Amino acid sequence: MDKVCLLVDIDHKGLDQSWSESAEGHRFALTLSYVNKEEVRPMFETGSVVAMIIFSESSNPDTTACLDLFKKYVGPLAEFQAIVSSDPDPEYMSEVFEYGVEKYFLPDQWALEAKNLCDYVATKLQDQDSVEAKAIKLCHNIAYGDQAQINSSQEALGDSYNWDYVAAYVKANALQAVGKFNEAAEAFRSSQNLNKMFRQASNGLGESLLVLGKVDEAIEILERLEKQNPRHVERKANLATAYMEKGEKAKAEAILAEAEALSPDHPRIAEARAEILLVEGKVGEAFKMMDNLRDVGPFFAAKLNEMGIKLSQQGKGKSAMALYKKAHKIVRHELQYKISLNAALACYRMAEYQVALQYLARTEKEFGGPYEKVDKIRAAIRKIMSKATAKQVG
Amino acid sequence: MDFAKGLTPHTVLFLVDKREKIVTLGAVFNKMNYKIISAISLYEALKMIDQEMPHLIICDAIIPDGTAGNLYDRMQQQPLFKDIPVLVLVASKTKEQLGPLKGRKFAGFMLGKFDGPSLMAKVKEILEGHGDISPFFVSSEQCQLPEDCTLAINAKVIGRVGDQMICQSESEVDGEATLLCQPLDKAKGPALLKMGSNVHKAGALYNMFPMNAVRGSGRTWIASLPEINLDHMQGDTEGRRVMYYDPRPERFEQFKKVLSGYDFELVYAGNLQSAAAMIVRESDGSLGCVYLDELPSNSAGIAVKEAVAKINERSRPAVIAWTTSLNAKSTKEIRFIKKPFGLGMLVETMDQAIKSKTNFAEGASVNLEIQYQTPAKLLGLDETGGIVQMKFPLVPGSKLALQHAGLIEMWGGTSEIRIISVMRLEEGSNIWQAKFENLSAQGNKSKYWEKLSKQIGQRMIGESA
């Protein structure tokens, strides 16, 4: 598959007509692909994108949405991305730096600069042992693969996470994806120590601490980052959730209002709103809101699992199953196996053993191989089923 | 093979009948950054040619002890000099003037009265006809030398100040360069260093690298370097006061807000005159650094430079200036950053500028010997050294080691070079070329080149055999 450098047209100032002419005469080491903002996600989903150049003169929510997609599908590779802008203002610089991006191309020089960028990216990726090549593979596996593939590409990082902040960051993401939140927090912390300017590691650490219930520590980190850039919607959503967890609803609402003012349609805002409803016990309203969510992160996924377990343990198995069905549809790909496992447990508690076995099979598939917890539950179910059969025979 | 225009500094020999002519011609040529040498006799000229191996000779048709024809004939007798172009100044189309020029292949003629612009145009045409390089240049391919080589600078790590790694070396490093830091202690891993800056203190040169930008396994030992901040600057905003000049006040307000998150305190100067006044007023060292949105070469820009120069070295704030010029080169007084740039770059540059004021020169040192290395391509050799090509600039004046097995053998075991000039291959390109001189080539150039040419010849025979 060709490796692609996206040319994302946010400004719509005639780039669709002029880009191929500007690129003429240059030899690009990657395939250039012009896209408008609607085409960005599908292009990332092809798995072929390795570099991105965004044509956006000034701050725009679509720009950060593209940077978010790059982070998810390609990785935290700031040097593989650039912005075309003649005079970025400080707030714009600050927003983009949230993703580590520092390359700005002047509009009249973009083609030559893009050639240099493509050369750089291609050289890095030619070396399969480079941290960048390994990071892309790992991010790809987190986005599409199963737990076994995530683990294997995490192992391929070797000891590079001890000395490379990108490696430490992607390792943390992988650990988070396989549910090891304590270890993920440590890896985020290590990435942050290796590069104190790498804000994605600090954001990741804040989110991990939130999942671990270390709310005060999470707030301290997120507030420090807020001071440096108060225009990052995702962090605001995390901060609002953290304050809600602490019981400071007014503060949480105020922060969410700020986030909404910046980007009203950002999916993390709806997610945070649903989280707040759940914390308040407004389950029905939260359920309604969940219909509009997708790619839900580890904190909300953990909350949904926690609530499902509680319902199941209280004997409200059917409600738990309804929750899990919805949750499975909206959480990130790599978090689905846990929902399936909890659904299997809920069925087990309801003595719906055949359905439980089906959920266990799905868990195994999503996990990508044998999973100890699945084996234990399956063994328990089989024991009960064989006893029941023996009883019937007797 | 393409070469950056103006990369090779040309030596031009004037052979004229009167000293006054040299004054006139010299004034025209000095502007072009040519090295001018002169002679007023054939005898003197031949000595000069042997010593300096000029890239062009501008010669009067008639000289006190001969003619341009005599010069040409003498040069043809010497294989080393026969390709040096000769441009003849012919005062009039008389038999006396034109006679001695017949039957010889001169590079050109300038007829009639002295005409500066026409002469310059002709000179440029002749030199560019040679690819704007030395007429003696021989490519690596012709020499049968592999192109791949490594440029290395010996340095030692002395410690860190905050998040800046401090090294000491004899060479300045360019902020755009990516350097491989290779410790001599093989137990320590290598690291990639970026965004280097240079500080001169107490007669020594220090290179600073932000630790946040360091990649590679060497990051592990770099993380444990000892702190050598003798001034015990506290965190927060102490010592992080930045004088900021931007003609757009609204932009200042935005930067003030953003940079306060990184503990910088910005104070505003509305124009360059008030910036200069503030620099003098706050010469007690309270300014961590000075940040200028532009630094024009007019009187206002000069006033700022003078204000900075007035402050004693210990209290003097480092100056950071934005530029859109591709040719702006940082000096030890002013660091230029090319527009547009990212926030991290700005924060790290300001941090470096502020930390460069620290009294680390007197601090204890870990004295860890390292080498900065960078891969390069040896394009070829000439009478003073040669040309290398890299993916980022080097700093002119830097002393480096050119590690290339074949070349070191030809140079008799030495590898020390000095960078003379550095240029982009073409505007916007990420390919840079550097003209270097071999330190062992100093002195009589023809002796050096003759010896080297013989070795090149032997090498070519050896390879073909």
Image (cartoon, coloured by chain):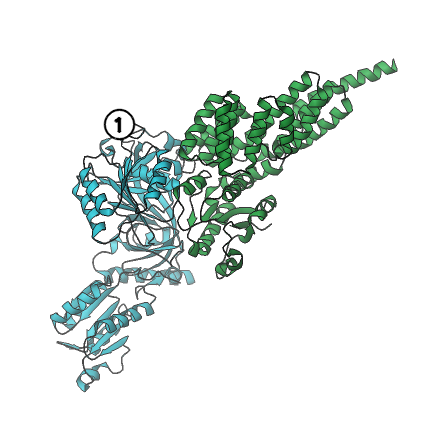
Chain colours: A green, B cyan
Position of A67 relative to A297 (above/below): below
- Tell me if A21 is positioned left or right of A337 in this view: left
**The disc numbered 1 marks a residue on which chain?**
B
Residue located farthest toward the bottom when viewing the structure as drawn:
B95
Between residue A264 and residue B99, name the one nearer to us. Answer: A264
Quarter of the image that includes the C terminus of chain A: top right
Q: For mark 1, does the 10 Å Cα neighbourhood hold few (<14), some (14 to 19), or many (20 or more) residues?
A: few
Can the viewer see residue B9?
A: yes
Position of A120 relative to A262 (above/below): below
Q: Quadrant of residue A348?
A: top right
Question: Residue visible at 29% across and 69% down?
Answer: B124
Between residue B395 and residue A251, name the one nearer to us. Answer: A251
Q: Position of residue A292 (x, y in %)?
A: 62, 35
So how many labels did they put on this image?
1
- Tell me if B42 is positioned left or right of A264 in this view: left
> Which residue corresponds to mark 1?
B232
Question: Residue visible at 50% across and 59% down?
Answer: A18
Kindly state the secondary structure of the residue where label 1 is placed. loop
Residue located farthest toward the right when viewing the structure as drawn:
A393
Question: Residue visible at 18% across and 47% down?
Answer: B306
Q: Quadrant of residue B19?
A: bottom left
Q: Position of residue B432 (x, y in %)?
A: 37, 54
Q: Amino acid at mark 1?
A: His
Position of B91 relative to A385 (above/below): below
Q: Position of residue A8 (x, y in %)?
A: 52, 49
Q: Position of residue B193 (x, y in %)?
A: 37, 41
Can the viewer see residue A378?
A: no
